[in-house]
Image (cartoon, rainbow, N blue to C red):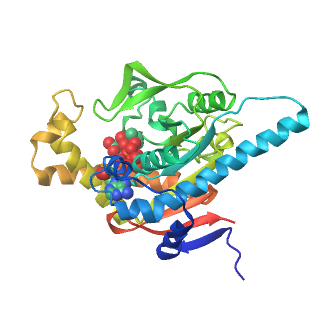
């Protein structure tokens, strides 16, 4: 008996769905997509993300229709509130890249929805608070976030408020930027990505809240990959930062740009084993089965299978 809550698609089966997608991509669109990430292949966009954007576009339309039906029933006229797509998964799995691809593709559909992108990293507590709470080695763990501020933020977006602002986290300074905020001005769609998008009370035993981020998320995606690949991607990205952003003297990890590649790999590997890998096992992967859709990635970030809730 098949008692799973998901329909499972192998890569080839999912890719076939692109034949149902009537969205021709121009040369310019392809160039824009390629600009998101130099290692992203266009085949990957066409075979995996294009059908996914079509499905999401249909869900958004259906939601808008439901609101129209509700307004008819109530004999009133309420404004639409943004549709929220949540993207969860490990550090370095590619949440922000997935979010940017979907943002670009969704904006190309004929309705040209305005799509905003928000990362929950902005709700990490500033370093000074983490130091005071002895949590600097727990960045990304539930207790390192101001979860109440995050829930209030998504609730405000869903209330239809004209402008809602979020703090910004910088990977360069490794801290919340003191005088900058991101403002979300009632777009059609908000893509909210972060480690904690699907977390619930179990993850926050010391700060019990009755309402969670996922209560406001209309459609959730969990991006997953095997542990050894994730560690490898984390180390690769660390080395990329080391050659790029960390060479900036203002970078928190500037000293890493001066050490040998071998030393840098040892450090990245330790950070993975002691922080990000542990957080994945304890607090992130256990939320996977709450997602509406799971993208499983294999070597080179290629999606190997897709699971969609029945
Ligand atoms: N589809 C893809 N194709 C090729 N490379 C990718 C893809 N997605 C992500 N990557 C690479 O994987 C690494 C991690 O990606 P990204 O920064 O999007 O992850 P993330 O999950 O948002 O990480 P974090 O939680 O630390 O912010 C980056 O080096 C990125 O270039
Ligand atoms: C900011 C987070 C928590 C999530 O993106 C992560 O990238 C991070 O900084 N983790 C802490 C350990 C590390 O430096 O990777």
Query: Which quadrant of the figure shows ligand 2?
Result: top left
Residue 273 visible in the shown view:
no
Where 66 sits versus 298, above or below?
above
Asked where in the image residue 121 lies, by quadrant, the reply is top left
Q: Tell me the quarter of the image containing the C terminus.
A: bottom right
Residue 308 visible in the shown view:
yes
Q: Is residue 98 left or right of residue 218?
A: left
| Percent x, y of residue 226 | 41, 66
Q: How many marks?
A: 0
Q: Residue at x 83, y 42 (%)?
A: 69
| Percent x, y of residue 182 | 46, 25
Foreground: 58 or 21?
21
Q: Residue at x 13, y 55 (%)?
A: 262
Q: Residue at x 17, y 34 (%)?
A: 254
User: Which residue is the extreme one toward the top?
Assistant: 179
User: Which residue is the extreme one toward the bottom?
Assistant: 1
Where 281 sits versus 131, above or below?
below
Foreground: 285 or 218?
218
Q: Is residue 298 left or right of residue 116?
A: left
Q: Is residue 84 left or right of residue 301?
A: right
Q: Tell me the quarter of the image containing the N terminus.
A: bottom right
Q: Is residue 183 left or right of residue 71?
A: left
Asked where in the image residue 227 lies, by quadrant, the reply is bottom left
Asked where in the image residue 47 lies, by quadrant, the reply is bottom left
| Percent x, y of residue 124 | 45, 32
Where 122 sits versus 218, above or below?
above
Foreground: 32 or 260?
32
């Amino acid at each position: 008996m098949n008692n799973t809550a998901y329909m499972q698609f192998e890569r080839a089966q999912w890719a076939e769905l692109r034949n149902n997608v009537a969205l021709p991509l121009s040369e310019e669109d392809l160039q824009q997509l390629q600009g998101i990430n130099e290692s992203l292949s266009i085949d990957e966009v066409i075979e995996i993300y294009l059908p996914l954007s079509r499905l999401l576009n249909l869900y958004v339309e259906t939601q808008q229709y439901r609101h129209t039906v509700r307004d008819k029933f109530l004999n009133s006229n309420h404004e639409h509130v943004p549709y929220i797509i949540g993207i969860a998964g490990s550090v370095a799995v590619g949440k922000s890249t997935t979010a940017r691809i979907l943002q670009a593709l969704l904006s190309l559909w004929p309705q040209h929805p305005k799509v905003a992108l928000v990362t929950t990293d902005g709700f990490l507590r500033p370093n000074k608070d983490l130091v005071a709470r002895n949590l600097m080695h727990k960045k990304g763990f539930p207790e390192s976030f101001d979860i109440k501020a995050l829930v209030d933020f998504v609730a405000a977006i869903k209330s239809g408020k004209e402008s809602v602002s979020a703090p910004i986290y910088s990977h360069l300074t490794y801290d919340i930027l003191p005088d900058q905020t991101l403002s979300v001005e009632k777009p059609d769609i908000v893509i909210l990505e972060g480690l904690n998008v699907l977390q619930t009370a179990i993850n926050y035993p010391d700060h019990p809240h009755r309402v969670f981020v996922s209560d406001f998320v209309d459609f959730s995606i969990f991006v997953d990959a095997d542990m050894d690949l994730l560690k490898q991607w984390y180390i690769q990205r660390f080395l990329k930062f080391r050659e790029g952003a960390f060479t900036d003297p203002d970078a928190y990890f500037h000293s890493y740009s001066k050490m040998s590649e071998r030393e840098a790999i040892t450090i990245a590997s330790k950070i993975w084993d002691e922080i990000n890998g542990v957080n994945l096992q304890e607090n992130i992967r256990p939320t996977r089965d709450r997602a509406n859709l799971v993208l499983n990635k294999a070597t080179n970030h290629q999606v190997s299978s897709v699971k969609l809730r029945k």
